[in-house]
Amino acid sequence: MTDVTIGVLGGTGPQGKGLALRWAKAGIPVIIGSRKTERAEATAQELREKAGVEHVTGKDNAGCAAEAGIVLVAVPWEGHDELLISLRTELAGKIVIDCVNPLGFDKQGPYALPVPEGSAAQQAEKLLPDSRVTAAFHHVSAVHLEDLSLSEVDTDVLVLGDDREATDLVRELADAIPGVRGVYGGRLRNAHQVEALTANLIAINRRYQVHAGIRITDLPE
Amino acid sequence: MTDVTIGVLGGTGPQGKGLALRWAKAGIPVIIGSRKTERAEATAQELREKAGVEHVTGKDNAGCAAEAGIVLVAVPWEGHDELLISLRTELAGKIVIDCVNPLGFDKQGPYALPVPEGSAAQQAEKLLPDSRVTAAFHHVSAVHLEDLSLSEVDTDVLVLGDDREATDLVRELADAIPGVRGVYGGRLRNAHQVEALTANLIAINRRYQVHAGIRITDLPE
């Protein structure tokens, strides 16, 4: 995987930053994307120091999307559609990984927001007709990703999509993080429940005071 | 748990029958419910022989709901609403566990059906205002449950509901099955994605030729 460059849109947020750190550490070149180039550069600097590597750079989101070979969308749900519309040209022909969880919070805790297209990933598919859209990395704890004292991150990553070659490659990106296993999780039309399950994991985190992930049982080693 | 009797509506189908078998084996009295008393009695007979116990009986669904202390709803999604409406009186005051997965299948495989109330469990809550509705046991493989050569069933059971005492009790019912662990999984309004995730597990089963379950990571032992 070290010959592909991963761009992380929203790479200054906890989820994008955590995944970028682990990929950088695994030897994969990363471009941090952010609305502001300076913020992206500051995070890139932080990750280079933390991972002890040189292959992390920072760009604005358009520059990140244009230069990277594979692009992770790790932005807040609010603004997801606008950003993707603006990057349609830069993302054409590329594998796009959407990890966005459309969630709301009220005094009863987290809940899944309705999405007209069915899911964030399906919205991406609709807005990026020339890209190869997959969905993955919804449930990985940012806290665990950022804590390099944890040599392994104990979770499977469900990878969804209708393009077999793309989902296989994204599974490899999951496997590149120690402890993590990429598992094919179904077609993109079944992405909603995977995104929404994050609400249940947050409820579990609150009840048990943990950073929960999921494992799929009965798979061959 | 051996002082409570569990009724299983739809107890002649694979999911209900498999859970009934494991509970019976764990010493918990079970009443199999079915539309036809004779079919319920035949399944009860089969389970008594398979589990080597006497405490499994068969009734029609109304008789099952009336006599049992806790009731599992394991009927097909089609007809779920009608059955619950007809049993509102019998189920009043009782803990009801809904494990129904509203799924459709086409040539692309399984997918989640839209449910006006949000989920099967929320439909049950609406139709049974006098019951204590929970949702659980959506992902347990019927094949593994029915295969007693497997001494343990390798899965967690997410238990959802707004009534803490009820979800704690249902978690104990999950724990009663060797290998299974009951985990609080959030409020009932977050049941949809847990039901729908069954479509992803079926996709996983087809891709990897397994009977997948899920485990929650990072929980204390």
Image: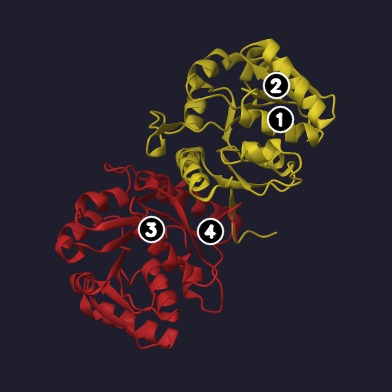
Chain colours: A red, B yellow
Residues at marks 4 and 1 touching, judged by CB atoms closer than 8 Å: no
Q: Residue at x 67, y 41 (%)?
A: B144
Mark 1 lies on residue: B20
Total tally of numbered discs in the picture: 4
Q: Which residue is mark 2?
A: B32
- Closer-to-camera residue (A165/B196): A165
Q: Amino acid at mark 2?
A: Ile
Labels 4 and 3 touching (C-beta < 8 A): no
Around disc 3, counting alpha carbons within 10 Å, would you say few (fewer than 14), some (14 to 19), or many (20 or more)?
A: many
Answer with mark 2 or mark 1, whichever residue precedes in sequence: 1
Foreground tag (4 vs 3)? 3
Label 4: state its secondary structure: loop
Q: Are marks 2 and 4 on the same chain?
A: no
Residue A27 spot, x, y in % from top left: 41, 81
Pointer 4: residues within 10 angstroms few (<14), some, or many (20+)? Answer: many
* Sequence-wise first label, 4 or 3: 3
* Callout 2 secondary element: strand
Give the labeled residue for mark 3.
A167
Amino acid type of the residue tagged 4 in the rendering: Gly
User: What is the chain identity of the residue bearing mark 3?
Assistant: A
What amino acid is labelled 1 in the image? Ala
User: Mark 2 vs mark 1: same chain?
Assistant: yes
- Residue at the (44%, 80%) spot, across then down: A25
* Side of B113 where B167 appears, left or right: right
Q: Secondary structure at mark 3?
A: helix
Which residue position holds label 4? Answer: A213
